[in-house]
Amino acid sequence: MLPNENAIETINLTKTFKSKTQDSNRFFRRKTVSVNAVDNLNLEIKKGELFGLLGPNGAGKTTLVKMLCTLLPPDSGTALINGYDIVKEQMKVKRSLGTLFSVGERGFFWRLNGYRNLEFFASIYNVPRQKRHERILGVLKLVGLESSSFQLYQKYSGGMKRKLALARTLLPDPPIIMLDEPTTGLDAISSRNIRDFVKSTVQETGKTVLYTTHYIEEAAQICTKIAILKQGKIVACDTPNALRDKIKKEEAIYLIVEEVSPAQIEKMRSIQGVIDITEKNGEDLMPNQKGLCVKLQSVDQLPSIFDFLFKQKVKLVNFKREEPSLEDAFIELTKRV
Amino acid sequence: MAVWDELEKIWYFMKRDMVSFSTYKTNIAVLLLTAVFGALSFAYLGQSAVSQSVLQSYHMDFTTYLVIGLAFNTYLGQALTLVQKTINPWALEEVLVSPTGLTTFIIGSSIWGFIWSTGVVAIYLFIGVYFFGVSLSVNIVGTLIVLALGIGTFIGFSMIGSGILILTKQGDPVTALITIATSLFGNVLFPPQVLPPLLRAIAYVTPPYYFFTCIKLMLTGWTIAMILPDLEILALMCFIIVPLGYAIYAWCLKTARKNGTLSWF
């Protein structure tokens, strides 16, 4: 049998929740509504990949993470974690995974210090007792908490609590780590520290990381591959650049021009190959300047635009090619479902 | 090796609870004072009680009867609520994703509570013996057997109550019912022989009655053979309620996981 290259693989994974809705006029009449939190999901994450799972609130990210870590049984389908089935080989799956939940800091014991908390979790995660002390100090140092390891957990700041949760995730040294919205609620510096730490951990140790977030640029900064999830389905899965390219149907250029009249803009619209022109009022404009976003069928039409401006004696101050952001891609792709 | 690993995990559960508990210093002082004053007040009550004739069949005075009843009521109160205390939803999720089994989790989470309760029982008995002339003649083996059966039975009830709580999120009717049954029918503060016939009949089908009857007799010089009929009934109840409680708890936990409602509190 060939060795499995995938660290995480889902096969038609499905989870449906039933919830009761209440008609405000009819108190006792309740309807049961089924919501497909994860819908027939097929996903492959290669070993050593830093994989981002992006999706709006309620897309099914946390449900997927909870199923992968065996906390939530799937309704149908299954998933393989490090080659182990999440339904049939739960203990082996648990030994292969470290999971950080979005409210992971709530699972600590507030009256114990950081070291004692990790000591407890090291025991239940079967960290060998000979290596336990060394390992705890190691992960505390790794997340930058070595100087506050004997401080009571209740005195930790939000960022420190999240770092300790990250340390707990790394404690058993699992080959696969799942981080469910690890920077939610943190300030910019703490968020960046965690992102940098995750990225360097993957680079140095070769671990596979599944990183869920609804912050688009965060995923773009650190992930090598991103899947966009909506209503439990993957609507796109590729590298950040490839996702941007997916929505790039036409070329767009941004022109800053001086002394252009509305009539001249109208004339410009009639140039062959121009799809649309919209005015953009950026902060970088002088009072006599206008910003024009010109959508073209192809970049080949660019010389005719410049020629037109020259003939009309419209002064071109600056121009740049407009690239769609990952945010554009995210909005466009999630709109399509 | 595996057993040793599980025992070590239980030790760390206990250590976690002990260290957490030791930080609540005011609470410890209040609990100790409650135990001392509880023992004192009920010992005085026992000395002044007039209905001691009912207890002639037990061959013990009312003070001894009360002090033992109250001491072990604390113990069983601990057993009855211990599984509920473990269902902090976030801590539960963190443990459930670890390679640690449910049995180790339940035992580990309860052990410190029992150690503390043993200390409270010791305070009750110490005050009773040294200040109020309570006379104890302990059948150690018998006491341990009765304790194991009683604690097991009450943990069984605790698991049933916790399972219901995991699903309903609020309201644990089992704990409330058993607490009431213990005070009314449990042979803790008064013998059920003083109750009207119907209530007395109910007392004879409740586990607390058999536990308190047996433990009181095992601490006052009776032999196992002398209490065997009651002990057999207690054992039967324990062997039914413990697996039933475990099955109900495991089923409720599985259902809550399936519905994704484990952390909905």
Image: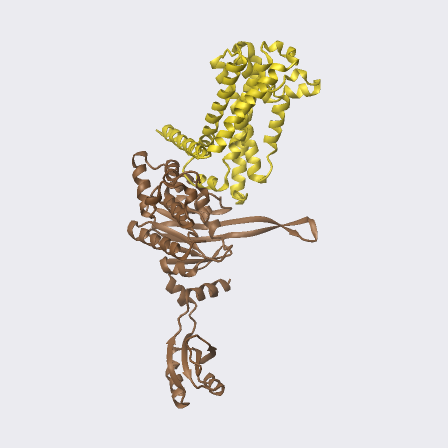
Colouring style: by chain
Q: In this orientation, which residue lies closer to the viewer: A113 or B40?
A: B40
Q: Count the marks.
A: 0
Q: Position of residue A57 (x, y in %)?
A: 50, 56
Residue A304 at x, y percent in the picture: 39, 85
Q: Is residue B108 above or below residue B218?
A: below
- Judge from the rendering whether residue A114 lies leftward or rightward of residue B158; answer left or right: left
Between residues A314 and B231, which one lies in front from this camera angle?
A314
- Residue A290 seen in render: yes
* Quadrant containing the C terminus of chain B in the rendered view: top right
Residue A231, given in percent of the width and then of the height, sits at: 51, 56
- Which residue appears at 41% of the width and 79% of the height? A255
Is residue B187 placed above or below A111 in the rendered structure?
above
Q: Quadrant of the N terminus of chain B?
A: top left
A65 is higher (above) or lower (below) than B164: below
- Residue A78 visible, this angle: no
Horizontal relation, residue B143 to residue A196: left or right: right
B58 sits left or right of A149 in the view: right
Instruction: Residue at 63%, 21% (x, y): give it.
Output: B185
Residue drawn at the location 31% of the way across and 37% of the way down = A133
Q: Identify the residue shown where x is 42% and y is 57%.
A: A227
**Chain ID, yellow in image:** B
Residue A204 lies, in percent from the top left, at 28, 51
- Colour chain A appears in: brown
